[in-house]
Amino acid sequence: MSDLVKTEVRGSILEIVLNRPDKRNAINGELYAAFDAAVNVAARMSDVRVVLVRGEGKAFSAGIDYTDFLRLSEEYGPDWQQRMRKITDDFQRVLTNLERLELPTIALLHGYCLGLAMELALACDMRIAAEGTMLGLPETLLGMIPDVGGTTRLVRLVGPGKAKELIFSGRQIDAHLAERWGIVNHVTPPEGLLAAGETLAEEISQAAPLAVGMAKRVIDGLADIDRGLMLEGWAQSQLFSTEDFMEGIQARMMRRKPEFKGR
């Protein structure tokens, strides 16, 4: 497994740690693959009852590493923009595996939790955030939508109105507002974040694991996640061929304000 993701078992808890602190745990292809591998390992652990997901350093994760878009042409070919359904499916599969893990998952958020990182957190069962954490889905500011389950799972949590407000604006919100909206379960002082996660994990660990796993399946089965993911993939496949998308990415990499033209 790559050093970009670390794992540690402590009693009944498995900790998965994003470990690219020099880049605020920005998610590139190698880190994403290593995270997927860690989730697959967790699925085979018989003595683990709860999974904690956190980030090393000053932030949970600033989201996708935008320079990684350059990798897409190498992996999917020069016509990668015409293969967005396949690319989106590959990205979605990782977080779908996380969501469908029968073990309860808790994301411990601090610093920043943006874009793909927030989509990862939304795929967890619960989220605890340190005070001062900023959360957001800024994809529309880049000419995209949250297409790795972010749109679908956010609607499930907060309803269409709040989801539209956050996604349409691309704004960041703090941990306390995220808690009021129902995105975050609890907010804690930064120094107590890990302890809060471990306390909740230990409480869950006292319940019957088969019952917890079945309860998770029933609750998740109440939402039509598969249809939502399909619609996200369809929409993104259209947007990646637009001039606005290219403008959004170039502007972000050049640290300037984008000039969108609606085409």
Image: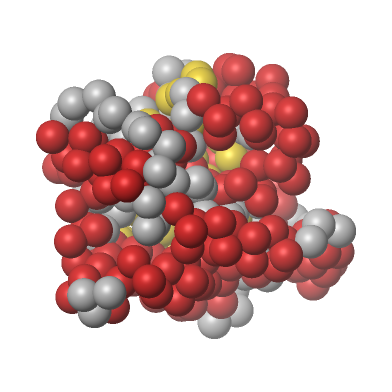
Q: Is 21 above or below relative to 88?
A: above
Residue that appears at 17% across and 29% down: 255
Residue 256 vs residue 261, the one in the foreground: 261
Residue 145 vs residue 206, the one in the foreground: 145
Quarter of the rendering containing residue 159:
top right
* Residue 140: percent from left, percent from top: 45, 37
Task: Please state if 46 lies on the left or on the right of 56 as rendered.
Answer: right
Residue 224 makes an appearance in the image: yes
Task: Please state if 62 lies on the left or on the right of 12 as rendered.
Answer: left
Residue that appears at 37% across and 33% down: 261
Q: Is 38 above or below relative to 259?
A: below
* Residue 259: percent from left, percent from top: 29, 28
* Residue 114: percent from left, percent from top: 41, 37
Image quadrant for the C terminus? top left
Task: Please state if 211 lies on the left or on the right of 85 as rendered.
Answer: right
Image quadrant for the N terminus? bottom left
Residue 90 makes an appearance in the image: no
Residue that appears at 23% across and 36% down: 252
